[in-house]
Image: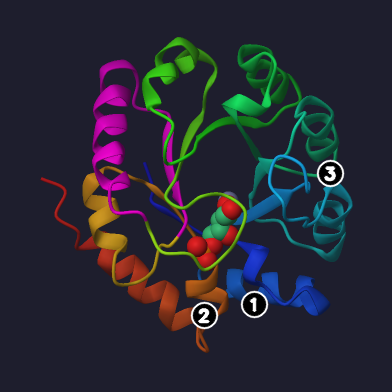
């Protein structure tokens, strides 16, 4: 499975979002990570489906990875699917019926993701494994950009990778929060294949160089 570098637009320049997203894709990013916060599930408030649709209308064709930090989730699943999302992930505790929400994402033609906060064990994953296309492990408390990676998540990535290996090879393992050039190899070595990075990419003054350095560290990570 190809390793994907996914800049989070939470740290992009909102005043010129289309151009900034185009720039980061031109610099080598694989997928755009879209952090949706509702001032309810998390205190912060960001953007909704209209902004996703605007990026599509602007000409962005790369996959869009919608990370819902909202409650309830089902209405926004439908709205983001029609707005052009590819992946839609939600936090298990924010849905009344995870299996239903995961199925709904697929019925809408998107790939489904289940998110686990740093303090939530991944044990529940097994019961939903047949409905999941991606597992998203949070490596910071959701709600804000530019936080420190929580080191204990490394073991959780390993544990999740082992669990996935017992069942399937087609589910992505995404890690989100505090990823930068300096720690991306360790995250890859633990078993991740999809890497969200907001401030480390949009906060750098050379997107191309930062993404290239990340990819080099991923490619050279010790995965044996
Ligand atoms: C946190 C978001 C993350 C975050 C990543 O709630 O889900 O996607 O923006 O930002 P950095 O890479 O700056 O930690
Ligand atoms: Zn996110």
User: Residue shown at 81%/34% (left/top)?
Assistant: 76
Q: Quadrant of residue 57?
A: bottom right
Q: Secondary structure at mark 3?
A: loop
State the residue in front, 54 or 102.
102
Range of residues picked out in magenta: 150-177
Label 2 CB-ligand 1 distance < 8 A = no
Question: Circle 1 is placed at which residue position?
Answer: 23
Residue 70 position, x and y percent, is 73, 38
State the residue in front, 29 or 90.
90
Q: Secondary structure at mark 2?
A: helix
Question: Circle 2 is placed at which residue position?
Answer: 207
State the residue in front, 145 or 215.
145
User: Residue shown at 50%/83% (left/top)?
Assistant: 204
Q: Is residue 189 visible?
A: yes
Q: Secondary structure at mark 1?
A: helix
* Label located before the other in sequence (2 or 3): 3
Q: Residues within 10 Å of mark 3 (few under 14, many from 20)?
A: some
* Label located before the other in sequence (1 or 2): 1
Number of callouts: 3
- 101 relative to 137, above or below: above
* Label located before the other in sequence (3 or 1): 1
Q: Quadrant of the C terminus?
A: top left
Question: Circle 3 is placed at which residue position?
Answer: 83
Residue 3 position, x and y percent, is 38, 51
User: Residue shown at 80%/55% (left/top)?
Assistant: 47
Residue 97 position, x and y percent, is 67, 13
């Amino acid at each position: 499975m190809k390793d994907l570098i996914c800049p989070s637009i939470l740290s992009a320049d909102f005043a010129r979002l289309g151009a900034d997203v185009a720039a980061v894709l031109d610099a080598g990013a694989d997928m755009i990570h879209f952090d949706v916060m509702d001032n309810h599930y998390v205190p912060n408030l960001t953007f909704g489906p209209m902004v996703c649709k605007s990026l599509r209308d602007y000409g962005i064709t790369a996959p869009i990875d919608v990370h819902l930090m909202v409650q309830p989730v089902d209405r926004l699943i439908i709205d983001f699917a029609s707005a052009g999302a590819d992946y839609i992930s939600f936090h298990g505790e924010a849905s009344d019926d995870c299996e239903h929400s995961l199925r709904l994402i697929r019925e809408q033609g998107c790939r489904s993701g289940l998110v686990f906060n740093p303090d939530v064990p991944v044990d529940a994953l097994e019961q939903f494994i047949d409905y999941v296309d991606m597992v998203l492990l949070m490596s910071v408390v959701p709600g804000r950009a530019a936080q420190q990676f929580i080191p204990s998540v490394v073991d959780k990535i390993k544990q999740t990778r082992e669990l996935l290996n017992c069942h399937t090879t087609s589910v992505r393992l995404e890690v989100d929060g505090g990823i930068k050039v300096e720690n991306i190899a360790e995250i890859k070595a633990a078993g991740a294949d999809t890497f969200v990075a907001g401030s480390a990419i949009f906060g750098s003054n050379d997107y191309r160089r930062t993404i290239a350095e990340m990819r080099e560290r991923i490619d050279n990570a010790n995965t044996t």
